Amino acid sequence: MPPASPTTRRPTITDVARAAGVSIAVVSYALNGRPGVSAATRERVLRVADEFGWRPSAAARSMRTGPRAVGLVVDRSAAGPAAHATGVLEFVTALQEVLATRNLALVLQIVDGPEAAVALYGEWWAERRFDVMVVTDVLVEDARIDALRRLRAPAVVVGGSPDDHDLAGVRVDEADAFSRVARYLLELGHRNVAAVTAPAGLARTRARVAALGRVLDPAGGHLVHEATAGTAEEAAVATRRLLTSGRPPTAIVYDSDQMAIAALDVARRTGIAVPWDLSVVAGSDSALCRLATPSVTTLPSAQHDLGVAAGEAVLAVIDGDPRARRELQVGGLAVRGSTGPRSR
């Protein structure tokens, strides 16, 4: 029996049972990983279900099975260990607190690369281990999102493009936040600015660099972009390269707190005084920025709010809204000792 056309109606569990030549009860057992079904039958049912593009109703599963799971596969190559050490725990804690209000478990696994994430999605969805997948560290061209679309698996994309209109999403207004950073630096007299970021393939990297450029360019500013793996070590290397170039910047904007702290050490070792010779701005705040000497000017961290918004979007998907949307604004710049008027 050929798969039902997606343009006619949504396939049902009855369609899957008929095509696989088994009862509805056997399909239910196979799809939910319950005992009593042979391995060969389970494989046939899962294959037919995938061919139909069938997926269970999250709300219906909620009523039948009680506590369920939300999947989060973190790609450590996307933003580097430094970013994960400080940001992911805050995000995960806030996300889990929201999910716990519905007795939802959070299943977290760390992988290396989007290909590994795609393979894990396929395995988890075939075994129906999750009801909703949360996707973080979104890439400009992201195979993970394409895979979830092919699987027809419910998902919440954190930080994705507004064009991901067929999936639920949580978006941070990076453009507004980094435009404000650029305007602040211009007010201080800085025209030669650099951005040291996580990998260039990240959607948030593209949004941040574009926002800086849109403000600096019309004002006669010059922006240099150094993409790194997002680690403190690579940020230090990039900073040294910038400060010893023929046209060193008078201000540098970093993605994370640890990257900015590493830059302070490089400046000190190269005899460059912060903020008199160089202004430093971090894209996310932490105790490190407040305790550094000098303390670092930063945008506030959005990780907790992102976790809460992602959790709310997950609950909305489970309640029947597969395209739930949340948008976050980044708070005001915390001006501290690492920034000052241009002096050279």
Image (tube, grey):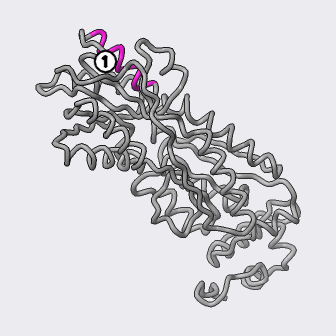
Q: Viewed as shown, does residue 121 lie left or right of 130?
A: left
Q: Secondary structure at mark 1?
A: loop
Q: Viewed as shown, does residue 19 lie left or right of 253?
A: right
- Residue 96 is situated, as x and y percent measured from the top left of the image, at 72, 43
From the image, give the main secondary structure of the stretch colored magenta.
helix
- Residue 124 is situated, as x and y percent measured from the top left of the image, at 67, 55
Residue 57 vs 231, above or below: the answer is below
Q: Residue, x 25% and y 13% (percent of image)?
A: 272
Q: Is residue 338 magenta?
A: no
- Front residue of 12/47: it is 12
Q: Residue, x 71% and y 56% (percent of image)?
A: 130
* Quadrant in which residue 327 is drawn: bottom right
Residue 47 vs 120, above or below: the answer is below
Which residue is situated farthest in the front direction here?
187
Residue stretch in magenta = 258-269
The residue under label 1 is which amino acid type?
Pro
**Quadrant in which the C terminus is drawn:** top left
Q: Residue, x 68% and y 68% (percent of image)?
A: 321
- Front residue of 160/76: it is 160
Residue 196 vs 119, above or below: the answer is above
- Residue 54 is situated, as x and y percent measured from the top left of the image, at 68, 75
Q: Residue, x 48% and y 33% (percent of image)?
A: 284
Q: Badge 1 is on which residue?
A: 275
- Residue 153 is situated, as x and y percent measured from the top left of the image, at 63, 65
Label 1 CA crowd tier, 10 Å (few <14, some 14–19, many 20+): many
